[in-house]
Structure formats: C-alpha cells, structure tokens
Image: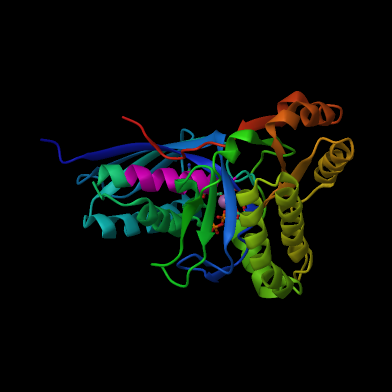
Amino acid sequence: MSLKQHGKARAHTNIALIKYWGKADESLIIPMNNSISVTLDKFYTETEVTFNPEYKQDRLVLNGQEVTDDEATKIYRFMDLVRERGNTSMYAHIESVNFVPTAAGLASSASAYAALSAACNVALNLNLSDTALSRLARRGSGSACRSIFGGFSEWNKGYDDETSYAHSIDANGWENDLSMIFVVINNKSKKISSRSGMSHTRQTSRFYQYWLDHVDDDISDVKDAIHNKNFNKLGEVIEENGLRMHATNLGSQPPFTYLVPESYQAMEIVHQCREAGFPGYFTMDAGPNVKILTEKKNQDYIINALLKTFREDQIIASDITQTSIEIIK
Ligand code: ADP
Ligand code: DP6
Ligand code: CO
C-alpha cells in the first residue's frame, strides 16, 4: 500500500457586494467588518494536492509554473496549518490551475484557498464541516472563507479563529435570476495586493472610521433586499459600499487608488443603462476591473451598451453558482 495521500477539488471565486477591507488580526485573518458576496459560475480554481512521506518540502505549481519566494512562503505557512489539523508531518506537492486571471482583482485568492482547503480535506481525510473548511480557507486568504458556499455568502467577522467564518444566505432561488458582467480592463497582476492595500488603509486612512461606522447598516440593508428580492435596493447599497471602500483608499497616507479612467467609463455606461430603464449596479475590488450585478433579463442590453466602448473579449457574463466546491475524482 502506498503511503501517498491525494485529493483534488474545484472552488469558485466570489465577488463581494459588501466589502471586506481591513483586518482586526493580520496573522489570524480576522476582519474588521462582516462582508457579503456572490459566488460565480464562470471563474474557478482547480487544485490537486499529494502528501508523500518522501517529499522533502512543500511545492506549488501554479498554472504550470513553479512558485517561489514570498508566494511560496505563504503556501508553506498555510500547509503547516493543514498538517496540524491532519496530525501529519508529510509535505505536499500542489498543482493548481486558475480559470480566472491571477492577482488581478478578480478574486483568485478566494477560489485558490477554498480549493486548496477542500483538496487537503479529502487528501488527509480531515472530515471538516463547511464551517471548519471556511475557517481553514480564511487563514489562507480572507475572501476564501466565503468561497466554500454558493449563492449569497456572508462572512461573520467573529472575534477569534473559532468564531470567524462564512455561511450561506438563503435567497429563495433569487440568485438564479441574477448575473454578473465583468468588464476586464486589466487582467495583469496588480501592483498593490489586497493584503497590503487594506492594511495600509486600515492604518492610515482618514476615512476608515467612517467606513466602519456605516458597514453594519449596509450589511443589514443587503440582507433585507435579498429577503424581499428588491433588486434596486440591493444595487443602491452595494454600489455605494464599493465606492466607499475605494474612497477609504484615497484617504490613506499616502493615498492610492486601484481605479483607472476606463473603470470610470464603465461606471458611466452602467448609469446610462439605468437611466434607460435597464438597471445594473457596479462594484470594484483591488483592481481596475468593473463587475456589474444585474438581472438576467437586462444582461444583454447592458453588454451591448458596453460593447460600444469595450472589446468583446473584455466582457464576460457569469451566472451565480449554487455550489462552489466540487470534489474531483
Ligand atoms: P486576487 O484579486 O486575484 O484575489 P490577491 O492579491 O488577493 O488577488 O491574491 C493574489 C494571490 O493569491 C497571488 O499572488 C497568490 O499568492 C495567491 N494565489 C492565487 N491563485 C492561487 C492558486 N491557484 N494557488 C495558490 N495561491 C494562489
Ligand atoms: C477588495 O481576501 O484577497 O476583494 O485576506 O489579505 O488574502 P487577504 O485579502 P483578500 O481581500 C479581498 C478584498 C476585496 C473585498 C472582498 O473580497 O471582500
Ligand atoms: Co484576493
């Protein structure tokens, strides 16, 4: 019998509607505020992990390329947590493919750590519940804790490692009526990672307290809007919350922004569609790309409006998926 242990899983990315922006504990990844996301059908990561007593160290091959330096250190630290849970000292070889651009503000870290956690869960027979899996994924990248679930997902900030994890929000199937349109303005790796951007903002932004003072209201407004299937209400809240996050970056010392002129062009088109009676609402993450939440019935109108300014290959529409994690045999 071989002592090797193997697991493979797919996890989908999620895009936050109410943003996670700032950590209360940087090493445990406990956030300053709750966040809410949708999990997307089109974008995902597949990760295969093999533990073997003969391996001398962990190894990550991402999109066919061996990962080294700081990125590798992040993975080694995460794998130490996995080994602790599995009561093993075996190192692992990890092979991962992103079906989403890496580090471009399209949430690759979310699907990455959700898939890795799920693959390790299988490989080491950890039998982790969804909650436990969410807590583990959180330690790799905060947003990953929401990618354990499909549909709408909320990360309860909690106050320690035990209490900080995501759960799914029951939307009564409403997510099937919605979709998200991605305007890919730049799919290259960003200069300021989410991790360092939010840390700098939390520590130096003159607007950060304002952010904290309003985010709880946004969370409860979004939950109400989901409960009542009130798309316009949902949209108004999420658009404002996303812009407020980007405003906190401008209040940092020194200030910075992830947005570029084309981001504003896309936002303007969304406003025009709304005025024409085809509502969509935008949100942006740690990158210039614009994501537009819409009802499926209005998706084509908004895509056609975007195509007057952007190329066809810059526009990708995705459904919201009901399940995020799939175990691959
Ligand atoms: P994004 O907006 O894509 O989530 P982040 O700055 O949050 O950008 O995270 C990007 C980082 O996530 C990468 O630099 C890498 O460390 C990690 N990452 C992305 N994809 C993978 C993967 N498939 N496996 C392991 N780590 C990954
Ligand atoms: C703007 O989860 O990528 O996308 O926890 O440091 O890995 P780390 O950061 P990450 O941050 C995501 C920030 C965001 C908003 C969100 O997804 O909630
Ligand atoms: Co990320």
Q: Residue at x 89, y 40 (%)?
A: 275
Nearer-the-camera pick, 238 or 101:
238
Residue 251: percent from the left, percent from the top? 78, 69
Residue 147: percent from the left, percent from the top? 49, 47
Residue 259 located left or right of residue 153:
right
Nearer-the-camera pick, 271 or 55:
271
Residue 31 located left or right of residue 233:
left
Residue 186 located left or right of residue 91:
right
Nearer-the-camera pick, 248 or 326:
326
Q: Is residue 116 magenta?
A: yes
Residue 302 at least partly seen: yes
Residue 254 located left or right of residue 135:
right
Q: Residue at x 63, y 62 (%)?
A: 220
Q: Is residue 24 above or below residue 192?
A: below
Question: Which range of residues does the magenta coloring cover?
Answer: 107-120
* Magenta part, dominant SS: helix
